[in-house]
Image (cartoon, grey):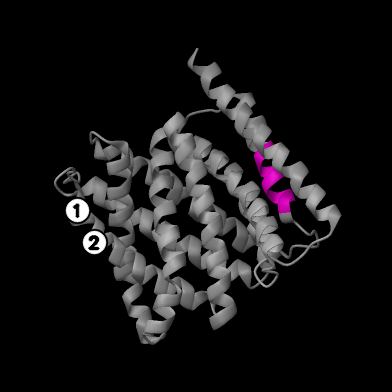
């Protein structure tokens, strides 16, 4: 459990850093879609380089079930990404970032439906607390249209299915090292995603400059996903997402540090009320992680 929690926190830290790098790219090139395309191609190259290095230590299951799961995982991720960009058309980025915290609830319900494994009431309390903290961290309020809600639910379900499939892929590896298995599955998945991204170069012309500018985001995100897979493989997708919610706390701390350094173009200033709310929500999320950890130990006994 400790390995999974540490992996999840490190992954959250790297993801928080990747968000900063994504802002740098978007401010420079004014396109989040180009960032997605060029970073995905780079991560495909990372996967292509990673897999040969791991082959002496791993063996991918030569079963149709494994590769069907892999394809389903990639397709659900792509569906989630499509839903993300569609939702982004209806909601501000800051609100959408907060609402992503609701994925924990969707994931818990999806996991119960797929695995037929009920959760303890303490775990449900932790899930509700974590969702409240994640949503309240930056949520600005306001009405959400029916169209935005529909795309949001579609995106959350797609991402939740992807998370569950990722955990199952790692379990099927049956290797000697969880970190090696996690790295191998992440590399294989992003290699396939990179290949599927190639046709988009017909729309977004190849640019060495844009590829170079997306490198910091791609590298930090790729490493974050390897650690995320380690987290899921160790403690499961639901608990892993609760630990991952710590990226909200880390992002707030990183934002404060960037403001202190004078990078206001990367992290806009907010009032004291907003900082107090963020601090309160951070405490709620820490309580949620502690409660879920306690519930895990309690259920084992």
Q: Which residue range is magenta in the image?
A: 129-137
Residue 165 in sight: no
Quadrant in the rendering for residue 100: bottom right
Q: Is residue 135 magenta?
A: yes
> Residue 230 or 271: which is nearer the viewer?
271
The correct choice, above or below, for 72 with respect to 34 in the image is above
Q: Is 227 placed left or right of 155 in the picture? A: left
Badge number at residue 53:
1
* Residue 60, x across and y down, in percent: 20, 46
Residue 203 in sight: yes
* Residue 169, x across and y down, in percent: 32, 44
> Residue 79 or 56: which is nearer the viewer?
56
Give the dominant element type of the magenta stretch: helix, strand or loop.
helix
Q: Residues within 10 Å of mark 2 (few under 14, many from 20)?
A: few
The correct choice, above or below, for 126 with respect to 102 in the image is above
Quadrant in the rendering for residue 285: top right
Q: Is residue 123 magenta?
A: no
Mark 2 element type:
helix
The correct choice, above or below, for 129 with respect to 220 in the image is above
Question: What residue lies at 53% left-to-right and 24% top-to-bottom?
Answer: 296
Badge number at residue 49:
2
Whether the residues at callouts 2 and 1 have beta carbons within 8 Å, the answer is yes
Question: What residue lies at 38% left-to-right and 60% top-to-bottom?
Answer: 75
Mark 1 element type:
helix
Q: Is 178 placed left or right of 227 in the picture? A: left
Q: Residue furthest top?
A: 301
* Residue 191, x across and y down, in percent: 29, 62
The correct choice, above or below, for 185 with respect to 191 in the image is above
The span from disc 2 to disc 1 (Cα, nearest Å) is 7 Å
């Amino acid at each position: 459990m400790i390995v999974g929690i540490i992996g999840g926190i490190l992954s959250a830290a790297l993801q928080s850093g990747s968000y900063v790098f994504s802002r740098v790219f978007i401010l420079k090139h004014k396109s989040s879609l180009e960032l997605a395309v060029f970073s995905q191609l780079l991560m495909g190259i990372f996967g292509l380089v990673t897999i040969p290095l791991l082959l002496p230590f791993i063996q991918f299951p030569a079963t149709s079930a494994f590769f069907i799961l892999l394809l389903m995982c990639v397709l659900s991720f792509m569906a989630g990404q499509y839903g993300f960009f569609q939702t982004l058309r209806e909601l501000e980025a800051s609100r959408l970032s907060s609402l992503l915290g609701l994925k924990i609830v969707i994931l818990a319900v999806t996991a119960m439906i797929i695995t037929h494994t009920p959760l303890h009431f303490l775990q449900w309390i932790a899930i509700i607390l974590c969702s409240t903290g994640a949503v309240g961290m930056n949520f600005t309020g306001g009405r959400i249209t029916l169209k935005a809600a529909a795309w949001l639910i579609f995106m959350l379900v797609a991402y939740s299915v992807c998370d569950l499939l990722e955990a199952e892929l790692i379990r099927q590896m049956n290797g000697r090292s969880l970190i090696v298995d996690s790295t191998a599955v992440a590399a294989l998945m992003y290699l396939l995603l990179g290949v599927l991204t190639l046709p988009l170069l017909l729309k977004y012309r190849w640019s060495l400059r844009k590829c170079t500018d997306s490198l910091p985001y791609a590298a930090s995100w790729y490493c974050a996903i390897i650690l995320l897979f380690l987290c899921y493989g160790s403690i499961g997708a639901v608990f892993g997402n609760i630990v991952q919610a710590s990226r909200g706390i880390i992002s707030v701390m990183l934002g404060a540090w960037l403001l202190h350094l004078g990078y206001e173009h990367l992290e806009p200033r907010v009032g004291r009320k907003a900082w107090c709310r963020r601090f309160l929500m951070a405490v709620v999320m820490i309580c949620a992680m502690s409660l879920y950890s306690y519930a895990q130990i309690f259920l084992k006994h």
